[in-house]
Structures are given as structure tokens and as C-alpha cells.
Amino acid sequence: MQSRAGLLACLTLFATPALPAPATGRAFPSYASIKFLLDAQAQQLPPDLKGADEVKWLAWARREDKAIRARLEQGDLDTLVNFLLYGVSFTKQPPLRMERLTEAAKSGALRARVNDLAAGLRDPGSNERLMFLHELMRNQGIDPASDHGETGSFIYNQLLRVLEQRKALGERAASDTSRSSLFHDRGLSLDTTIFAAFSIDRTLRDLKQRGVLREGQVARVAVVGPGLDFIDKNEDSAYDYYPPQTLQPFALYDSLLRLGLAKQDALSIAILDISPRVIAHLQRARERAARNAGYVLQLPRNSVHPWPAELATYWGSFGKYSGDAIEPMRPPEVFAGLETRAVRINPSVVLACEPADLNIILDRLNRPSAQFDLIVATNVFVYYDAFEQSLALENAGALLKPGGLLLTNDRLPAISGGSMRLEGFTAVPSGSSGAAGEGIGWYRKQ
């Protein structure tokens, strides 16, 4: 990757209010309930928790909760850069690949994209993504509607920041192949794709085959941080020609019914998230479902890069148990070879999915009825350090029934004396060869 100075030389050429979430009755865990974690990780604790007591613990938890939520905006700024490079809804320019960025800067293609994005932000029209980014810019003290070059300069600076961040992350990943807390100091991203849903589907099938989960056993499920498909950071699966959508809750519902692990009309899914955007999106979907309107999912597939046979089959049958296949939106011509499907999720399924504001790192639900059979959290815990991950694991345990399972693709530090244990691991095929790729660990409540 080129240096900041090198790219700078090339670059010198030039919303809707969130609806309230349902009350969750959430609270920070008591000092007594997490003291064993503080004792076990005494050498890794933040300075403010050294020699902690109830008062120090709650003061730290309040500050940390605020700091975690503030990282959402940083993640949104990262998404702005992905949108600049890969989006097609605001420009006629083709998407830019990272490895050709220097060439694009020299040729003017990058500048054209920046200019088109600045123009789109100035007058977003009905483009939901541009509307959101317009407000994001205003929160940064820049009004795209009265722009005098500040918008373009701000976009360039965010691009440079992300390039430096990617370089640092690459170096960190090379020295720590476990990826256990790779993004612990990065903005919180809402990216989501069908790949995480497939990994959970294969894991559920594996758990049924092993007898870990039984027919009809699952009734109450929680999904932590399901994400919102705004535009993916992976350039091979980054699309913005359809409205923003969330996928995992409906994919999980579909998988549980198809595998016989849950019964029709007896399954509820809580969506636990700290993002007002995710919560508002799901609330609006529920309001439409109450008027008997379904939720449409667009499912593009990049056929240039072959998928494992199992993933292609999963994609082709997605939604059979939660909705109906419909005619997909036609993608722009720039996406040559893109295969598409679309599914309209049934209103009853949408209404079975209820969002709530909860920070899994620091919050617990303080009502006994909030105990789940299963919790799913993919690409969530990698944004936190080991101590925060241990807190999250215990908070997940507090949400589960005895024997309940947490499924996650992040390796979490189970502490002696805690309520959760790693019981097993499911490897999921990746690539056209079917070689083992992502893995999902299962943690059981003792």
C-alpha cells in the first residue's frame, strides 16, 4: 500500500429521526457479579479499575458505555470511504479497487468520484444512504448544502485516514493471526453479508447432527449486532443499488425452521444493538409489518468469484421458510455477471423480531423472562479487547437459560469461575474448493 505522502501528492489536484427502542430494563452488572473477572485479569485491567469497588466499577462502566457508543460515528466515517470507492447510486463512475487507487488518483477517476459524492451529499434527494451521510457530515461541522470545498477535502482526509488504518491493521494481523481483538481501537462497523448467515446455518445443522440441539428446542433467540447492509468494506460484495437492509435475524429464523429446531409461530428473536440506526430500521419494518407489509431482501451474488457448493445452494433456497421469492431489482450494468435473487419476508416473521438497545459488553437485562435458548453474535467481539470480551461472555451467560448456547466467530476468553464454557467448534467451508474457512465456536451456559 502506498504511503500517505505519495497519495497526498496525487490528491492535490484538487435522515430520518430514529424511533425510540422498546424499554429493555437493562442495567450494568453489579460489582459482586464480575469481581472474579477483575481478580482474574488484574494485570490487564484499565487503570481506572485498579483496586476497584462498586463505585469505581459503575463509574467506569458508565464512561466505557459512552465511549463504545461514540465509536459508532467513527465506523460511519469508515463507511463513507467505502461508499466513495464502491458506491454506484451517486455516480456514473465505475467502482474503484484498492490496488488501483494510485492510478485512479493520477487519472482523475478518484477526483470525479469525490466530486460526484459531494454533489450527491449537497442534494441527496430520496437516496437513503446520501441522506444519512448528509447528516453525518453536518455532525462533523460541515454543511454539504452550502459547500465551499470543505466536503471534498473532508472526504479526501477520511480516505487517507482509512488507508493508514488498513495498513496498521494489516501489520497487526500479520503479528496476531488469532484476530481475537483485531479491531479493538477501530470504529464500530455495521457491515453485514450473507456469509455470516451461512456460517450460522451450517453450525446449527452441525449442532443438530451432533445432538447438541434437538427438534423444536429453540423458542427464544437473541441476535447481537445484526448489522445493516449500507455498503460492505469488501469490494467484491459491496452494493448500494438497493435500499439498506438487515439480513441476519431473518436468515436465522429461516434456518431454525428449515432445520426443525424451532416451531412455526413459536419462535421469537430479540435484536440487541447499540446502533440507533439499526434499531430504527427494524422498528420501521415492524410498523410496516403491522400493516401487513413484508420486508424485501435483495440477495446479489458475484459469480466472478466461485462460492462453495453448499453456500450457493444456501443462497438459492434462502427465505423458503420465512417468505416468498420475488422478482429482484435489476442491478446497474457495471455489475456484469451479477446473479440476483430477492425474497419478501412474511410480516409475521418481521413481527417476531423485536429490536432493543443493549450493549452486550456492559449491559444485562434485569428481568427473569429475558432468558434465551440461543444467542448469535458474529463479527461483534473482534472490536473489543480481552477484558471487554470476558465481560461480554458473562453478560451473554446472564441472558441465557442454563444449557443455552452462544454462537460466535470470535474466540472469547472464558475465565475460571465464570458461567460460560467453550464446548465445541464448527468449521465452515470457504472458497470454491470447499476448504475450511470461518469457524463458529459454541459457548454453553453452565
Image (cartoon, rainbow, N blue to C red):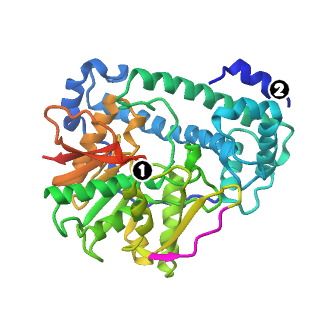
Residue in view at x 56 percent, y 65 percent: 340
Residue nearest the observer in this picture, 426 or 276: 426
Look at the numbered discs 1 and 2 and tell me whether their residues touch, using CB distance below 8 Å: no
Work out which residue is located at the far bottom of the displayed protein and give it.
Answer: 292
Total marks in image = 2
Residue 434: percent from left, percent from top: 36, 48
* Residue 42 % position (x, y): 25, 20
Above or below, 209 against 429 in this view is below
Dot 2 falls on a residue whose secondary structure is loop
Residue 311 occupies quadrant? bottom left
Q: Tell me what residue is drawn at x 26 percent, y 57 percent.
A: 204
Magenta-span inclusion, residue 233:
no
Q: Amino acid at mark 1?
A: Gly
Residue 25 in view of the camera: no
Q: Residue at x 32, y 24 (%)?
A: 49
Residue at image mark 1:
225
Q: Characterize the magenta stretch by its predominant secondary structure.
A: loop
Which of 320 and 145 lies nearest the eye of the viewer?
320
1 vs 2, front mark: 2
**Magenta span includes 325:** yes
Q: Quadrant of residue 158?
A: top right
Residue under pointer 2: 12
Category of crowding for the residue at label 2, using alpha-carbon neighbours closer than 10 angstroms: few (below 14), some (14–19), many (at least 20): few
Label placed on residue 54: none
The percent position of residue 275, horizontal first and vertical second, equals: 49, 50
Q: Is residue 303 left or right of residue 142?
A: left
Point out the image quarter for the N terminus: top right
Which image quadrant is residue 24 in? bottom left
Mark 1: few/some/many CA within 10 Å (<14, 14-19, 20+): many
Q: Residue at x 70, y 33 (%)?
A: 101
Chain part drawn in magenta = 324-331
